[in-house]
Image (spheres, rainbow, N blue to C red):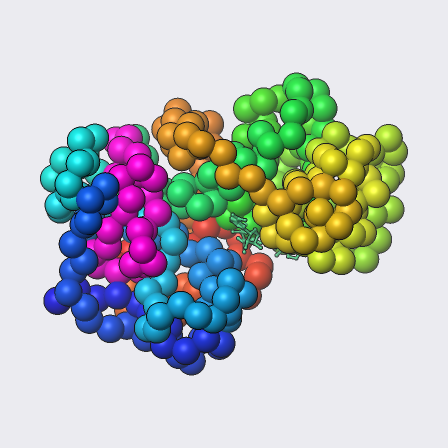
């Protein structure tokens, strides 16, 4: 048997628990892994709360990004073999907060030696999102990229990608994230009351791209700073972004491999700030659910 962290009811964290299941076997096009690390994302608790629907089968395994070692390969899988170190997204809702899971081979890449399992586990969701947000709208060296929610798992990586492309990046986050933002070469702007005025003073002509990781009123308040509303892209709140004339995050092909390469060469650091054992998955999720984590939280089964 193999442990997996699940939610048993849609709603709050009280329905979460660690249960045992048979280690899942790979189907055609899939690979089974022993999970070495799993990244925690806001989508984990949002899914539990029913933000993406409440029709899925329960109990539902939690965790959307994992790194581990291949234990079995399904029919037709040619790119991976038993013993390979990989990272990717779990298939069929089988969850990443688990001792064993299954990945879609087509959404998996080899883990470079230079990247630890812990860092690798932050790439499939947070890393690819940061990459997409900074590439979705055309932007050139010297142009301005404003990242709203810059101190979180995705935002920090987005700022580092901006530095690689020599963009003039501005990170909006709470005061406690100042050092973190400035360390990535970006200009720090404190969030909260008066943020629009502070931004306007810093960028009177507006910004070339507004990458949003917060949504709602915080996005509405800063949206007028985008030189053109179509330059607003949001991973947090596609509805509001579209309402404002922008777009939600679009997932592009081959991004997992690209961002893994960028991390491998040390240009982007997933900035894992805390790890928890699988037995404390609830604490790890609660830390992300607080909305103010200082980087990525990772579960180590
Ligand atoms: N569409 C997708 O495929 C996709 C993929 C990944 C993530 N997402 C979404 O993107 C968002 C960010 O994800 P994440 O993993 O980076 O989350 P995270 O690590 O929890 O970071 C969220 C950050 O938002 C900041 N924040 C909250 N309110 C703010 C405000 N009013 N102004 C400025 N910053 C504020 C928090 O920082 P402070 O403590 O500084 O306030 C926190 O650092 C989430 O909504 C997530 O669901 C979507």
Give how far across and how far down residue 290 sits, in percent.
Answer: 55, 66
Q: Return the residue nearer the eye: 214 or 52.
A: 52
Give the answer, above or below, for where 33 lies relative to 4. Answer: above
Give the answer, above or below, for where 195 lies relative to 264. Answer: below
The answer to which quarter of the image holds residue 169 is top right
115 left or right of 68 in image: right
Q: Residue furthest top?
A: 141
Magenta highlight range: 86-113
Residue 240 visible in image: yes
Give how far across and how far down residue 145 sits, in percent.
Answer: 69, 33
Q: Return the residue nearer the eye: 42 or 242.
A: 242
Residue 46 visible in image: no
285 left or right of 109 in image: right
Q: Return the residue nearer the eye: 66 or 243.
A: 243
Q: Residue at x 36, y 76 (%)?
A: 8
Q: Residue at x 57, y 59 (%)?
A: 292
158 left or right of 60 in image: right
Q: Return the residue nearer the eye: 122 or 182.
A: 122
Q: In what quadrant of the picture does the C terminus appear?
A: bottom left
210 left or right of 9 in image: right
Q: Is residue 97 magenta?
A: yes
Q: Is residue 29 magenta?
A: no
Q: Residue at x 36, y 63 (%)?
A: 62
Q: Residue at x 51, y 48 (%)?
A: 153
């Amino acid at each position: 048997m193999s442990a997996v962290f699940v939610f048993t009811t849609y709603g709050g964290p009280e329905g979460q628990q660690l249960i045992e299941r048979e280690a899942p076997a790979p189907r055609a096009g899939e690979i089974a892994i022993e999970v070495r690390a799993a990244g925690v994302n806001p989508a984990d608790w949002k899914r539990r709360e029913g933000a993406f629907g409440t029709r899925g089968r329960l109990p539902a395994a939690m965790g959307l990004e994992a790194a581990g070692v291949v234990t079995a390969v399904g029919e037709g899988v040619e790119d991976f073999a038993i013993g390979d170190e990989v990272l990717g997204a779990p298939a069929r809702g089988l969850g990443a907060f688990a001792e064993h899971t299954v990945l879609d081979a087509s959404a998996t890449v080899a883990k470079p030696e230079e990247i630890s399992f812990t860092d690798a586990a932050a790439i499939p969701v947070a890393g690819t999102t940061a990459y997409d947000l900074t590439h979705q709208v055309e932007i050139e060296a010297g142009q301005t990229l404003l990242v709203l929610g810059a101190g979180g798992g995705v935002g920090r990586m987005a700022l580092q990608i901006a530095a690689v492309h020599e963009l003039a990046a501005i990170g909006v986050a709470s005061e406690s994230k100042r050092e973190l933002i400035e360390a990535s070469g970006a200009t720090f702007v404190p969030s909260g009351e008066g943020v629009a005025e502070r931004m306007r003073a810093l960028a009177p002509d507006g910004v070339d791209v507004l990458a949003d990781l917060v949504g709602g009123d915080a996005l509405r308040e800063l949206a007028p700073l985008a030189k053109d509303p179509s330059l607003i892209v949001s991973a947090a709140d596609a509805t509001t972004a579209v309402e404002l004339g922008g777009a939600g995050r679009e997932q592009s092909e081959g991004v997992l491999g690209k961002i893994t390469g960028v991390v491998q060469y040390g240009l982007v650091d997933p900035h894992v700030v805390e790890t928890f054992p699988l037995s404390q998955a609830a604490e790890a999720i609660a830390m992300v659910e607080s909305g103010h984590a200082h980087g990525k939280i990772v579960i180590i089964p």
